Amino acid sequence: MPRGGAHFSSEELVRVLSHYDIGVVHKAQAVSAGNRLAPKIAAVLDFDSVRIAPPIADLANAMLQFSIVGGRPNPAQWPDYFDEHKLIEVLTGYREVVELDKNKLDSLLDLMIETMIAEAVLPVAATGFFGNLSGLDFLKMILRKAKWLEANKETLTRAIDS
């Protein structure tokens, strides 16, 4: 049982989590030269964002973070598309370690859309901004990218399933 209402021993945590399709996830953020220690990336951990959640949601977030294409300060100027190669590479690396059934594979693009929306809604609703970016421009960019994922779902799903 939890002690103090919030703390589990590692054994208790493993026992509880073993009954669910959840695990410790870290909500990886995009890697830039400023937060990279070596030229080759072996793992990405964001200890500020560790939580208990379905690992498939973490995978979808990683696919989103590593494949989103921005490049300009104003999200209104960001292209609609994603870097398909990076999206598939993240998934391929994950599948080298974890086997995913067809239902989970088929949910990834929808989870990417959900993640984009979920990440933006609270800060934009609270402040009108996403970081220092215009909230309206950021939400319009999310809508464009969500529509792109939907429009390219069949092609991306074939790549994901292969």
Image (cartoon, rainbow, N blue to C red):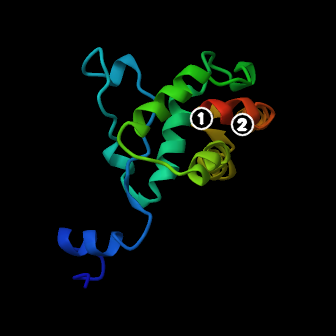
Left or right placement of residue 102 versus residue 93 in this view: right
Q: Distance between the residues labelled 2 and 1?
A: 22 Å
Residue corresponding to mark 2: 142
Q: Which numbered disc, 2 or 1, marks the residue closer to the eye? A: 1
In which image quadrant can residue 78 be found? top right
- Count residues near mark 1 (Cα–Cα under 10 Å), then give few for <14, some for 14-19, many for 20+: some
Whole-percent x, y for residue 90 in the image: 47, 31
* Quadrant housing the C terminus: top right
Whole-percent x, y for residue 99 in the image: 43, 47
Left or right placement of residue 42 versus residue 83 in this view: left
Quick one: which residue is furthest to the bottom in this view? 1
Quick one: which residue is furthest to the front in this view? 162
In which image quadrant can residue 33 be found? top left
Whole-percent x, y for residue 111 in the image: 62, 48
Residue closer to the observer: 114 or 104 = 104
Is 92 situated above or below 127? above
Q: Find residue 160 and name its label.
A: 1
Is 53 situated above or below 131? below
Whole-percent x, y for residue 18 in the image: 33, 70
- Labels in figure, total: 2
Residue closer to the observer: 101 or 94 = 101
Left or right placement of residue 123 versus residue 138 in this view: left
Left or right placement of residue 124 versus residue 88 in this view: right
Q: Is residue 9 visible?
A: no
